[in-house]
Image (cartoon, rainbow, N blue to C red):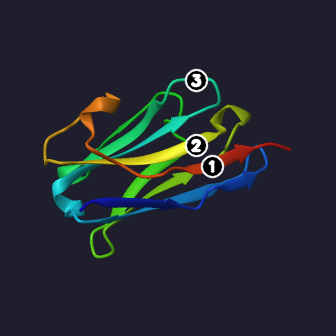
Amino acid sequence: QVQLVESGGGLVQPGGSLRLSCVASGLTFSNSAMAWFRQAPGKEREFVVAMWSGGRKDYADSVKGRFTISGDNAKNTVYLQMNTLKAEDTAVYYCAAKRTTLPVGRVRRAYDYWGQGTQVTVSS
């Protein structure tokens, strides 16, 4: 059984930083595509960033240069370092995964497994 558990969300001031973590169990992180999505109140869940085999990454334009995805194979954990946070980054952030070494893309339905989400609030 695959389980993704996110943590690290919270309240931060504009310009601040947070690091989210997603611990994966039931799948091999190094052979999976991992992604972060987010959903703001009243909006659709949107793609943030994905990482797949070989360390290849794809960032949404809205976070490029501010957010960084990384992984720790030994801990089966993927991280999302978020810097220079803005009010518009406020959302519930979800970790997603698919067992594949191929690029999965930005489409939500392409991912098979999801975490429960962690709230990020950027406010002064």
- Asked whether, in this view, residue 36 is left or right of residue 19, the answer is left
| Of callouts 3 and 2, the N-terminal one | 3
Residue 96 in the image, given as x and y percentages of width and height: 35, 46
Q: Where on the picture, by quarter, is residue 23?
A: bottom left
Look at the image and tell me whether residue 105 can be seen: no
Residue at x 14% of width, y 47% of height: 100
Can you say whether 2 is above or below 41 in the image?
below
> Judging from the image, what secondary structure is the residue with disc 3 in?
loop
Q: Quadrant of residue 40?
A: top right
Q: Which mark is residue 32?
A: none
Name the kind of residue labelled 1 in the image: Gln
The structure residue drawn at horizontal position 49% and vertical position 36%, both measured from the top left corner, is: 64
Residue 117: image location, x then y, percent = 51, 50
- Which residue corresponds to the image point at 67% horizontal and 31% vertical from the top-left? 88
Report the residue marked by disc 1: 119
Q: Residue furthest front?
A: 1
| Spot occupied by residue 122 in the image (x, y as percentages of width and height) | 73, 43
Cα distance in 3D space between marks 2 and 1: 4 Å
Q: Name the residue under label 3.
A: 43
From the viewer's perspective, is 102 left or right of 62? left
Q: How many numbered marks are there?
A: 3
Q: In this view, does 59 lie to the left or right of 104?
A: right
Q: Residue 92 carries which label?
A: 2
Question: How many residues crowd around disc 2 within 10 Å: few (fewer than 14), some, or many (20 or more)?
Answer: some
